[in-house]
């Protein structure tokens, strides 16, 4: 598995979610399985089947998070170069067609959250902005066509 680069906040969030899944959700699902098992015949027990399926999904999520935490590397903000757009920089861009300005943090897939204005470095916009400097125009192909963004400002998170 490849290294996942995260901010300290992203790393802390992963560890918190993992701890919550292990200490709260796992015992809850185990209890649901136990209660369903006590209701009798397992071959026709939909509640038992649902609880076992929930356990499988939970264990898969825990496994993925454990792997992500083990392969994570926290990048220090002090070492960030803001001459170009790269992972863990905040970039203000302007759509050249309509003049609308937006500010996004470029983060790893694990931290991406569009509602929080954090876009993945592997998303079309994230890829299109990488390596650009202030004043550059990025032509980014999106499902609706090509959008041109001017890089207005680059800073650290």
Image (tube, rainbow, N blue to C red):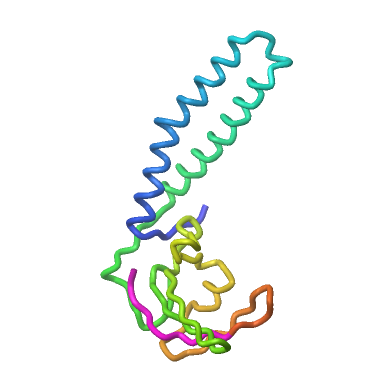
Up-down: is 66 above or below 122?
Answer: above
Residue at the far left: name it. Answer: 78
Quarter occupied by residue 43: top right
Image check: 16 left or right of 144? left
* Span shown in magenta: 148-157
Up-down: is 55 above or below 33?
Answer: below
Q: Is residue 144 magenta?
A: no
Q: Picture coordinates of residue 91 (x, y %)?
A: 41, 77
Question: Which image quarter holds the C terminus?
Answer: bottom left
Nearer to us in this view, 53 or 79: 53
Q: Residue at x 29, y 71 (%)?
A: 79
Image check: 84 left or right of 129? left
Up-down: is 22 above or below 49?
Answer: below
Image check: 79 left or right of 15? left
User: Mainly helix, strand or loop, the magenta region?
Assistant: strand
Q: Residue at x 65, y 8 (%)?
A: 40
Image check: 2 left or right of 81? right
Quarter occupied by residue 21: top left
Nearer to us in this view, 88 or 144: 144
Q: Picture coordinates of residue 129 (x, y %)?
A: 50, 78
Q: Picture coordinates of residue 42 (x, y %)?
A: 68, 14
Residue at the far bottom: name it. Answer: 135
Q: Residue at x 55, y 78 (%)?
A: 128
Nearer to us in this view, 45 or 81: 45
Up-down: is 50 above or below 42?
Answer: below
* Mark count: 0
Q: Is residue 153 magenta?
A: yes
Q: Residue at x 54, y 21 (%)?
A: 32
Q: Picture coordinates of residue 80 (x, y %)?
A: 32, 73
């Amino acid at each position: 598995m490849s290294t996942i680069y995260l901010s300290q906040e992203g790393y802390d969030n992963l560890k918190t979610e993992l701890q919550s899944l292990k200490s709260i959700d796992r015992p809850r699902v185990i209890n649901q399985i136990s209660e369903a098992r006590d209701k009798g015949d397992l071959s026709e027990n939909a509640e038992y089947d649902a609880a076992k399926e929930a356990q499988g999904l939970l264990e898969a999520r825990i496994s993925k998070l454990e792997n992500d935490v083990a392969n994570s590397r926290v990048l220090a903000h002090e070492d960030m170069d803001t001459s170009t757009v790269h992972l863990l920089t905040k970039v203000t861009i302007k759509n050249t067609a309509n003049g609308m300005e937006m500010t996004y943090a470029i983060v790893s897939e694990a931290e991406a959250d569009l509602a929080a204005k954090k876009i993945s470095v592997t998303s079309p916009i994230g890829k299109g902005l990488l390596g650009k400097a202030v004043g550059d125009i990025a032509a980014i192909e999106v499902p609706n066509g090509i959008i041109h963004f001017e890089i207005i400002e680059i800073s650290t998170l």
